[in-house]
Amino acid sequence: MTKLKLGSIKDDKPVKVTLELPATLHRDLVAYAEILGRETGQAAADPARLIVPMLERFIATDRGFVKARRRMNLSLVTGE
């Protein structure tokens, strides 16, 4: 079993997003969706639905961002 960073995709209300992706990135998203579907026992998700959880995961695991955000929130609270 492959250890993917994403788990099953939540069935949230869809939001329309318009952006252009390089063809290679789109092919990777399609492949990821197919593998994720096999791993979770679900049908392959629409590759566009992977973008939000991938970005959420990326932001949540970016230590530099987490530290900077914590400092920013602390400075907002303390007024410094």
Image (cartoon, rainbow, N blue to C red):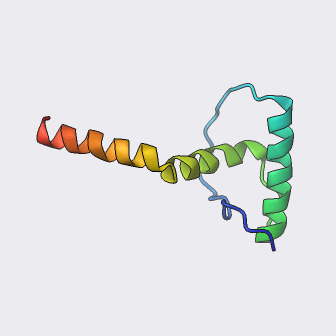
Give the side of residue 42 with respect to residue 64, left or right: right
Q: Residue at x 49, y 52 (%)?
A: 60
Q: Residue at x 63, y 49 (%)?
A: 54
Work out whether 9 lies above or below 75: below
Q: Where in the figure is residue 19, as x and y percent of width and height?
A: 69, 26
Q: Residue at x 61, y 51 (%)?
A: 53
Name the quarter where the C terminus is drawn.
Answer: top left
Name the quarter where the N terminus is drawn.
Answer: bottom right
Q: Is residue 13 visible?
A: no
Give the side of residue 25 with respect to residue 78, left or right: right
Work out whether 73 lies above or below 7: above
Q: Where in the figure is residue 46, as x and y percent of width and height?
A: 78, 48
Q: Hey, which quadrant is residue 65 in on the image?
A: top left
Residue sitting nearer the eye, 49 or 23: 23
Q: Where in the figure is residue 45, as x and y percent of width and height?
A: 78, 53
Work out whether 68 lies above or below 33: above
As drawn, which residue projects farthest toward the front?
Answer: 64
Give the side of residue 8 with respect to residue 27, left or right: left
Q: Is residue 38 visible?
A: yes
Residue sitting nearer the eye, 56 or 17: 56
Q: Residue at x 82, y 37 (%)?
A: 26
As drawn, which residue projects farthest toward the bottom?
Answer: 1
